[in-house]
Image: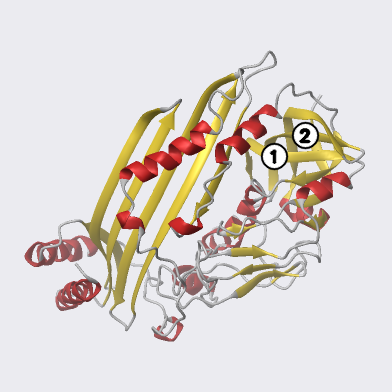
Amino acid sequence: MNTNEKYTLANLVMEHALKGGAQQVVVRIYERRSNNIELRDQIIDSLKESNQSGLSVDLYVDKKYSSHSTNRLKKDELFRFIDEAIISTRYLAEDEFRKLPDPELYYKGSGQELGLFDGTLDQVDAKTKIDLAMQALNEAYKKDERIISVTSNYNDFIASDIMVASNGFKGDSRGTYISLSASVSLKTESGRPSDYWYENAPFMERMITKDIGKKALERAIRKINPKKVASGKYTVIIENMVAGNTFGPVYQALTGSSLYQKQSFLAGKAGKQIAADLLTVYDDPLIVSGQGSRLFDEEGLAAVRRPIIEKGILMNYYIDNYYGLKLGMKPTSGSTSNIIFNAGSRNMEQMTASLKKGILITGFNGGNCNGSTGDFSYGIEGFLIQDGKIVHPVNEMNITGNMNEIWLNLVELGNDARDQDSWRIPSMMIKDADLSGI
């Protein structure tokens, strides 16, 4: 179906649901196409292609809510599907907060062109995709006698969606995504270190396809012969590749569901200092060709650039319509788009060279964060830094602390955020981190 045909079908389904007793209705029609190719030691280990299309409907019936989906898109079958869905919804408990957003908050259909769709991707043949994965693999394969396994992955994704709501929303979107990665495992006298590298882009012509396997191998080799270090307080540098692990608990604490369920260590802190004043974070959905860019969110709320943290001050939460009504707060959006950290003046290597003694964290291994208190404990791996130089790799260490404190100990941000990621977080330097080792 083309876009107009999807809108016609969605409107028919919406009108049928309203005639059947629903007071409010949302209909979405979606198409998904994806490819996944995995190579292991120059052999195709997995090759998957998926094509999906379907319809989902949200029903609001007598203060009761339900959501249903189907991949049967013939009109008569859809009408029976909707009739049965309305009957089942009537058995649910009432929830006075289940209603659609205020139409004034909706996207109105006049947004900028965000450049999210590669129209040529569907014409790229399977051999080209396999060749890209093989190229990444061969950059590492048999390049070191200690290698026991090299794998590479090619992935792409094409999405097309339309959405209509009975109180006036209408919008459509489409996007593409490509990624290429490699991972390398070694066998050494001190263990089996492994590491990876990846690149991604919304357009094939923008994909970085060189040195992926080479970088994965280099990262694995530098982990050979790790040593333990003494427990204590260290200045740490967190590499940009894994810095998102530290922001994930912050985002979760900012969501309406966490606030309402009293599982947020950031509850009641709007307008207060929650991080060092050098930190500013924006949620920016309007970046051209940004991985997380969009004109509207899952509920149809218009995409707006918002400060999340400004000079260390908490400015905004992530509030969807449902929890906004329950909390008495204006909806913003319940999900992130592009998370943009302000940049510093140095990259990770320059930050490392300036450090008298500390730990460079390049990986997190398990652990957890208590959403209500902010207390956390994570396994880490990385490198000991002394006099501005990397001395040796370290592992079997934990970093512990509290999210309410660690962000206040942020002392520097790098200038090396990965621009193709939706969370553009640079390397970060944090003082007085509690590390447990020997």
The residue type indicated by label 1 comes to Thr
Q: How many angstroms separate mark 1 from mark 2 (CA)?
A: 8 Å
Label 1–label 2 contact, CB within 8 A: yes
Spot the residue most to the top: 189
Q: Nearer the viewer, residue 399 or 415?
A: 415
Q: What element carries label 1?
A: strand
Q: Does residue 262 show up? A: no
Residue 383 got which mark?
A: 2
- Per the image, label 2 sits on a secondary structure element best described as strand
Q: Quadrant of residue 222?
A: top right
Left/right of residue 349 with respect to residue 281 in the rendered view: right
Q: Would residue 337 be seen by someone viewing this image from the given angle?
A: yes
What residue would you read off at disc 1? 362
Q: How crowded is mark 2: few (under 14 residues within 10 Å), some or many (20 or more)?
A: many
| x and y percentages locating residue 41 in the rendered image | 46, 25
Q: Percent x, y for residue 409?
A: 82, 54
Q: Is residue 13 left or right of residue 150?
A: left
Quadrant placement of the N terminus: bottom left
Horizontal side, residue 421 vs residue 82: left or right: right
Which of the two residues, 173 or 434, is positioned nearer the viewer here? Answer: 173
Between 333 and 382, which is closer to the camera in this rendering? 382
- In this rendering, is residue 362 above or below 322? above
Q: Nearer the viewer, residue 96 or 73?
A: 73
Q: Could you tell whether 77 is left or right of 309 in the image? A: left
Q: Going by the picture, which residue comes out furthest to the left? A: 76
